[in-house]
Image (cartoon, rainbow, N blue to C red):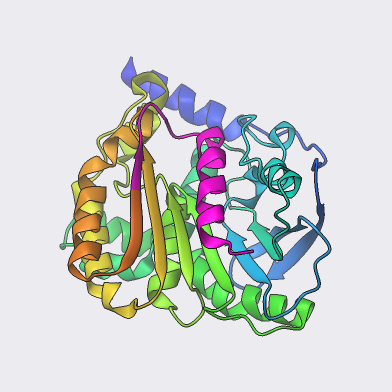
Amino acid sequence: MLKHILWLFLITSLLKTPQLIALEVTFGSFKVINFESEVIGDRELIIYRPNESQISDDTKFLIFQDGQMLFDAKATWNNEEWELDETFSDLSEIGIEPNVVIIGVKSANKSGKGFFDNTNRYLEYFPKQAISQMKPGFVRFGYKRMGEKTHYNYLDFLTGELIPFLQTEFGIRLNRENMGIIGASMGAIAALNAILEHPELFGFAGCFSTHWIGIKPLEYLTLPFRKKIQGDQTTIDSLISYVKARSKNLDSHYIYFDRGTEGLDSAYEGAQDQIDLIFESERLDYKSLVFEGEGHYERFWAKRFKSFFLDLYSP
């Protein structure tokens, strides 16, 4: 019976096709660019500006993972969004007009719930450098066999293709003084990976509901029925070891972590506590917050982003 349920879930996941809806924003302006990457394949970028501030050395550039989830719930698979346009509208109403450019990079997950789309997104965002921290065995073999394929080298895309493109597009040099990277869940893992490997490029990282725990295949396939996972200890250990080894690359960088206490976020406490101990022992500039009663949804990250951004922004 379980085998039949798993096959039914897998088949329906494969058949899901997202409805294409034109993106709309309630404040600011945007353009969509179909970026032809030689690393990860064609990928849409959403370039958003809340106002018409002149691009200068004061402009902050924020790269977001899962760019399709940032602005318009009608155009997302789960009818959720980060509400970035509403956030900047609220800030404008109180006289805050930040000179900022948002670059939303759409993820490999086109369908939202599709099994293979989610797998592609996971492998794209997972730090390849963490695989070497895994003990020998089936899990490490699987990560090496799948995750080290060239088209999953998301970090190479960011540093070798996207950032040079943005520098040409805006006529400005990008580095840790004017650029940060943000994501949620596996997108948060990708953001942390980027700043640990390239501290010369990114000055801060926003890691919302960081997905430290990986996932076992059976847990993923049965997630609609169980609604909760325990994660994979080999993956957890490898990520913690990786962060510990690379944390010395950070000096005056700022790292933001948070998590909720409900649903998937409830599984993050143990791993996040270990990461906090690493950052504390290295005396790094970081923040790690817990939001009671909040879960793994964009509506919660939307609220938290506003506070995160205000902490960063100095008018």
Residue at the image point whose x is 65% and y is 45% from the top: 70
Extreme-top residue of the structure: 1
Above or below 286: residue 305:
above
Range of residues picked out in magenta: 289-315
Compared to 204, does 159 lie above or below?
Answer: below
Q: Is residue 304 magenta?
A: yes
Place of residue 301 in the rendered image (x, y in percent of width and height, measured from the top left): 51, 41
**Near-viewer residue (123 or 87):** 87
Identify the image quadrant of residue 166. Answer: bottom right
Front residue of this view, candidates 116 and 50? 50
Residue 254 rendering spot, x and y as whole percentages: 41, 67
The answer to whether residue 138 is seen in the rendering is: no
Q: Can residue 22 be seen in this view?
A: yes
Quadrant in which residue 247 is drawn: bottom left
Query: Residue at the location (38% across, 27% down)?
Result: 223
Closer-to-camera residue (138/226): 226
Q: Please state the horizontal and vertical placement of residue 196, each as a whole percent of the image.
A: 38, 72
Residue at image position (59%, 65%) is 40
Q: Looking at the picture, how far across and down is residue 194, in whole percent?
A: 45, 69
Quadrant (top left/top right/bottom left/bottom right) for the N terminus: top left
Quadrant in which the C terminus is drawn: bottom right
- Report the side of 14 relative to 236 (left or right): right
The answer to whether 235 is drawn above or below residue 297 in the figure is: below
Q: In this view, does 194 lie to the left or right of 135?
A: right
Magenta stretch containing residue 305, yes or no? yes
Residue at left offset 29%, top offset 46%: 213
Q: How many marks?
A: 0
25 displayed left or right of 64: right
